[in-house]
Amino acid sequence: MKTKTAKKQPAALKAEFNIAPDEPVFTTGVVCRLLDIPVWVLKQLDAEGIVSPPRKRPAKARLYSKKEVQMVQHCWYYLERHGVKISGLKVILQMEQGTFKKD
C-alpha cells in the first residue's frame, strides 16, 4: 500500500528582493516594456557598441543588468526627447565620461 507524501509548498515570494546592479536578468522584451521603448533602440545601441550585454552562447538572447537598463534609459532620453542621432549620442556619452577627443 502506497502512502501519500505531502507536497512541499513553495516558499512565499518576498514582496521585494535585491538584484545586484551587474546581474544580467532582464530580457530584451522586459527592457522594452519597462522603458516603453521599441526593440530597434536596443538593437541599434547594441550594433553601435553603446550598450552591448554579452551573450552566454551565440543562440541565446541577451540579458541586461540594472546598470545596462539605466544606460539604455539615458540613451533613449537623448534619442527620443532631443532628437539626437546615434553618432551624436556617442559624442555626448564621451563628453559625459570625459573621454571625448577633438580631431
Image (cartoon, grey):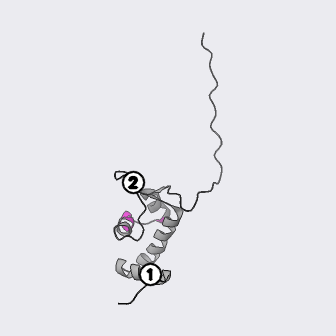
Categorize mark 1 by other alpha carbons within 10 Å: few (<14), some (14-19), many (20+): few
Q: Quadrant of the C terminus?
A: bottom left
Residue under label 2, please give it.
61
| Residue in the image at 37% along x and 66% along y | 46
Residue under label 1, please give it.
94
**43 relative to 7 in the view: left or right:** left
Query: Where residue 99 appears, x then y in whole percent?
Result: 45, 82
Residue 21 seen in the current view: yes
Query: Where residue 28 appears, x then y in whole percent?
Result: 42, 58
Secondary structure category for the residue under label 2: loop
Query: Where residue 98 appears, x then y in whole percent?
Result: 49, 83
Magenta stretch secondary structure, dominant: helix
Picture quarter containing residue 3? Answer: top right
Disc 2/disc 1 C-alpha distance (Å): 28 Å
Is residue 40 on the magenta stretch? yes
Q: Amino acid at mark 2?
A: Ala
| Residue in the image at 45% along x and 74% along y | 75
Query: Mark 2 against mark 1, which lies toward the viewer?
Result: 1
| Residue in the image at 41% along x and 57% along y | 62
Q: Quadrant of the N terminus?
A: top right
